[in-house]
Each structure stands twice: as C-alpha cells, then as structure tokens.
Image (cartoon, rainbow, N blue to C red):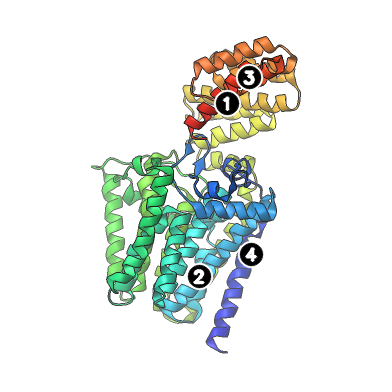
Amino acid sequence: MPPMSRQAIHAVIIVTLVAVTFGGALGNGFVWDDLPVIVDNPLVKGGRGVVALLAAEDTIPGLGSTGYYRPLTYLSFYLDHLLWGGRAAGFHATNLALHAGVAVAVYRLLIAVSGGGAVPLLATLLFALNPVTVEAACFIAGGRNTLLCALFALLALLTHRRGSTGLAALCVLAAAASKEAGFLLPPLLLAHDVVLAGGRRSWRVYASQVLPLAALLGVRVALVGVGANFSGVSPGLSLAPELVLRYLAVIVVPPLHRVAYLFAPPELISLRFAGSLAGCALLALLALRCRNRLVPFGGVWFLLFLLPAVAVAVRYKLPMADRHAYLPAIGIAILLSGVLPAAAGRVWLLVPACLAALYAGLTVVAVPVWKDNGTLFSRMVRDEPRAETGYTELASHLARRGDMDGAEGVVARGESAGALSPPLARFVRLGMYCRGAERLLEEGRLDEAERLVGKALKLEPDFVPALVDAGSIAARRGDLREAIRLFDRAAAVQPDDPTPHYNLAEVYRLLGDGVAAEREMAEYLRRQKRAGN
C-alpha cells in the first residue's frame, strides 16, 4: 500500500476515534465562563459590529477585563453564533472539529520528524484520546483559545520545516492572536532547527516571525493597554518545579486527572521544593542523554508551553487546570514518538495501544462532567473539597435555578469543610439571595423576591445589588417614591456603579419627570463609559 494512502487511513482513524470518544460533548450545554463570555456577550452576538469585537479584551466573570487580547478566538465565537445562533451543540461541534484538526496536525508532524509506521499513530492517539484534553475540548470559552493556538502552532512548525517562511509567519501570528502562548513560537522554531534540523537558519527567517508578533503586541497595547495579565504576573518560583511534575503526572497517568486541583506553594527552602527541583533535573538529564533527538525536543515543547501556566499559577485560586496541559501534552506525544521506536519488537507496541484504549474509556466518562453547571461544580466539590470555587459556583447555580435550600446547604458544607471562611460564606449568601430574587422578579413572584432581598439586606444593609433589587420590587408594586429612595441610596453607597442611575432614569420617566430622567441617564452613560463597559 502506498505510504500516502496509509497516512490517509491513519488520519481517518484519528478523526473517527476523536469523534466517537468526544461525541457526547454535543449534548452538553454552556457552562461556567461560557455564560458571560459567549451567551450574554453582545460582542459575540454582533451587536457592536466586527470591528468592536476585534478591538475587545478577553473577559471573565467577576473580574471583567483581563488584559488578554485574543481577537481570533472571539472572531470564532462570532462566526459560531452566525452559524448556530444560541445552540450550544454548534459551539461544541467547532471545538471538537478543532481538537480533531489538532490531532491530525500532531500526526502529520510526527510523520515528518520520525517517519512512518505505527509509532506516529499511537503517539497521536495517546494525546488525542487523553482525558487531560477534555477540558480544552469541552469547555468552549476556556478551551477555544487553546485549541486554535495549538492548531496554528503545529501548522507554523510544519510550514517552517518546508521552508514556507511567509506562511509560517502567518501561522505564528494567528496562534498569538488566539492565545498569548503563540508568542513562544519563535524560540520553539529555533529549538526545532537546532535540535532536529542540525543548525539555525538565516536571521531573516526568525525576523519574519518576530516582527508580526511585535506588531500584534503594539496593536494590543494601543487597544487595551498593558493589562492585568502582564502587570500582575508572579513568577511563582517556588511552585514551578512541582507544577512541572504534577502536569507531567496528569498527562502520563490520566487516572490522576481531576476537575480541580488545590495545593499551596512550598517554601523556597524546604524538602518539598528541593525534591521537586531534583526530580525535574533528573528528567532533564535523562532527556538530554537520549540518543533520539525527538526526546529533548519534545521536552523543550512541554516546558516552553508550560511556562505561561507556571507564571500565572499563583494568581488563581486553583493553581492547575487541565486546559493548561493541552499544549504541553503535544510535547509529550513528540517525546513518546522518540521513545517508542526503542521498544524491542512490535509486541511492545501493544502497550501504547492498550493505553490509548484506556485513555479513550476514561475520556468517555469525563466528557459528561461538562454537561451543565450543576454536574460540573458538583464534581469540582467532590474532587477538591478544600477549594472554594466549587462551592461558590454551585451555590450560585442552584440559586439561579431557585433551589435556595440546596444553595444554603452547599454554603454550609463549604464552611464545615473549611473551604469558605465566614466572611466569604456571607458574601456568597448575599450573592445567591440577590440572584434568586432577580429570577423571581422576572417571573413576577414579588412576595418571594422581597423575602430573599430582605434576607440579603439583613446580612448587609448597604449591599448595592440588594438595594437595587429592592428598588425594582418597589417600582413593580407602584411605589415609585420608595424605589427612588432605594436607588439613591445604592448610588450613594457605590458612586461608581452605573446601574442605580439607569434605574432612576426609568423611574423618573414613569413619573413623567423628563428632566430628571435625562439627567440620570446621562449620569448612567458617563459612569458606564468610565467603567469601560
């Protein structure tokens, strides 16, 4: 059979197995950051035009603008919305198509650097079917940027190998416009040339890759400023060696995979830090001593794309996330393609084949975890009962659904587990009372909404969302003067919040006071502009 025909069959096998293994994701809904980033985002819906979309920062709930600039990622969300409207299945289909495309690109790269045979296919399947890839493939808002960056990074390397300088530079730019990890591609391509190709190329080749990235960085700074992701990054030196080992363990031993990971950074002078550092040094020494150059190059890929996750780990409540392992896992696939040929005889190839089957089974089980927020955050609480994120998100989800007893129970469990401090538990309760009240208000159940708002104001008399909700309830009951009093109080407590002024404008309009309504609407617009909304 001609080699190209064999490669085409292998590519079909890869795509088919990815589709079968991850196909359950098509029945999943929008979860977690999908709601503010996609479902409730007017930019994605095209309400402000494509130009506004391409000039916007990445956002996450509770923090607003992050300082990340990922125009290609947001453009993909916009195109998905044009094709599928608000149907989650369409967005998931795009993610799965991208994951399958990344897997085929990994296979093409392994064929290019290691030759034909079963090894590239098996190494690719160990990556593509690994449950550590589930978060990137099934979490639309959190994984799309990684999938796009990975695809363009692989295309950049493949075109760079063929000497297509312009096309490689374009792929590097597209990777960086999808996720900041794309800025690491020039050193990666240089490492490829030194480790695999036996020497560096002309400086013009590398300049053609760096200059578009410099231009993108300039556009980014002009549009969104320096950003929190640059100014607030901590190197996390004490945690770095341990993170390298933990990510490696999760990639290689998927039963260690979880939805949430929680651990504190060690002291710089401690046995834990010294042991992690020694472990990393030993692995690096073994990789450098390996005769097959794919092993050190795979190690370089793994470490290089792990750098961003290590750099920002200490900024977040959960220091690890499986989606951050997606790009580094490609490096492990490259490394394995250099190790597997050393196995004596074809019988040894049954080991990675069986592992790939095991990975696929674990992935089939992991995909439904991302079905909805209730399933996801319940699993997060179970996986890491010491982490606050699962409790806060699950309580918020239950409150939105109207299950206030369930939400109260979750907060109580978080307190008893030590994950929620008393001040945090109080804040969570305030939020869930208001979210529950807003849902009841939309349904016209004013008495029930008023009871929940009363509980929030009893906990914190000056809690602005509760004051706004109380004012909305008063307005719905026809008590417009009481509504004005409550909205005025909210505006006085939190002067920078534009919301009370919008509500005041609406109430004054109902009262027929056009001058006051215009004044409050102008104040709303002024404060909204100042807030960057």
Q: Amino acid at mark 2?
A: Ala
Mark nearer the N terminus (1 vs 3):
1
Residue 78 at what x, y percent from top left? 60, 52
Mark 1 → mark 2, Cα distance in angstroms: 45 Å
Q: Amino acid at mark 1?
A: Gly
For residue 282, the mark is: none
* For residue 463, side relative to residue 87 (left or right): left
Q: Which residue is mark 4?
A: 19
Tell me whether circle 1 and circle 3 mark residues in contact (CB < 8 Å).
no
Q: Amino acid at mark 4?
A: Ala
Label 4: state its secondary structure: helix
Residue 101 at what x, y percent from top left? 55, 66
Q: Residues within 10 Å of mark 3 (few under 14, many from 20)?
A: many
Mark nearer the N terminus (4 vs 2):
4
Q: Residues within 10 Å of mark 1 (few under 14, many from 20)?
A: many
- Let me know if residue 365 appears in the view: yes
- Let me know if residue 333 appears in the view: no
**Disc 1 versus disc 3: nearer the observer:** 3
